[in-house]
Amino acid sequence: MTSNSKQGENAVPHPRVPGRPCSAAAALQLVGERWALLAIREIFYGNRRYEQIVRNTGAPRDRLAARLRALEEVGVVERRAYSERPLRFEYHLTEAGRDLAPVMHALLAWGDRWAVDTPPVAFRHRAGPGFGHDAGPGPEHSAEHDLDLMSTCRTCGEEVGSGSLTIDVRAPGWDRAGPVEGS
């Protein structure tokens, strides 16, 4: 692994992965295991203590402990003491962990659509006066509503759809089809 040049609470190591140089592959190397993502989900939900995370994920205790240690090593979570006697810790997301929020929301939205009959959780969004939004007319602009995320480009503000994207491969020796001959 190489170190992250970005500044933040913790530097996240860059894993070396086989095949095409790819940020998704590198991210999955760090957080892409089932119990790791479910532990992150629980911490997002405010369940920071090990017993809560074990109960709510259904993970085997040894595997969950290993995943939490790994997430701590790569700077996604940090342990903070909440009791001196006996010494006990709870888990908190670092900046890198909090930046996984859109990923978790996307996985939940995909699962709601394709993996379950009835969504088991709904995220609610507060809007209107006092919450940084001006509520407009109609029920979709009420003070609180189900969250429905969309991707927008920070540069131009347009909604992003797959038809509006092109791929600019920047990894030396690679193009869209794979490794370039003679590189």
Image (cartoon, rainbow, N blue to C red):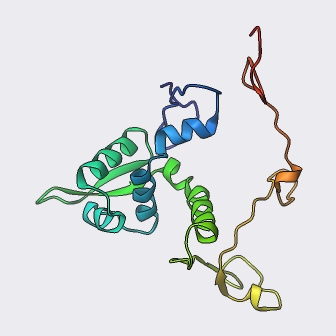
Where's residue 136, x and y in %?
Answer: 82, 87
Q: Residue furthest top?
A: 182
The residue closer to the viewer here, 110 or 83, is 110
Where's residue 140, x and y in %?
Answer: 76, 85
Instruction: Classify residue 146 as left or right of residue 152.
Output: left
Q: Residue at x 76, y 91 (%)?
A: 139
Q: Residue furthest bottom?
A: 138
Where's residue 125, x and y in %?
Answer: 63, 78
Instruction: Classify residue 133 as left or right of residue 60.
Output: right
Q: Could you say which quadrant of the image residue 102 lies in?
A: bottom right
Relative to 114, does residue 67 appear above or below in the rendering?
A: above
The residue closer to the viewer here, 66 or 118, is 118
Q: Residue at x 69, y 81 (%)?
A: 127
Q: Residue at x 66, y 79 (%)?
A: 131
Q: Quadrant of the C terminus?
A: top right
Instruction: Classify residue 174 as left or right of residue 159.
Output: left
Whether residue 36 is visible here, answered yes or no, is yes
Q: Could you say which quadrant of the image residue 7 lies in?
A: top right
Q: How many marks?
A: 0
Instruction: Classify residue 47 as left or right of residue 97.
Output: left
Where's residue 144, x and y in %?
Answer: 65, 86
Q: Could you say which quadrant of the image residue 87 lies in?
A: bottom left
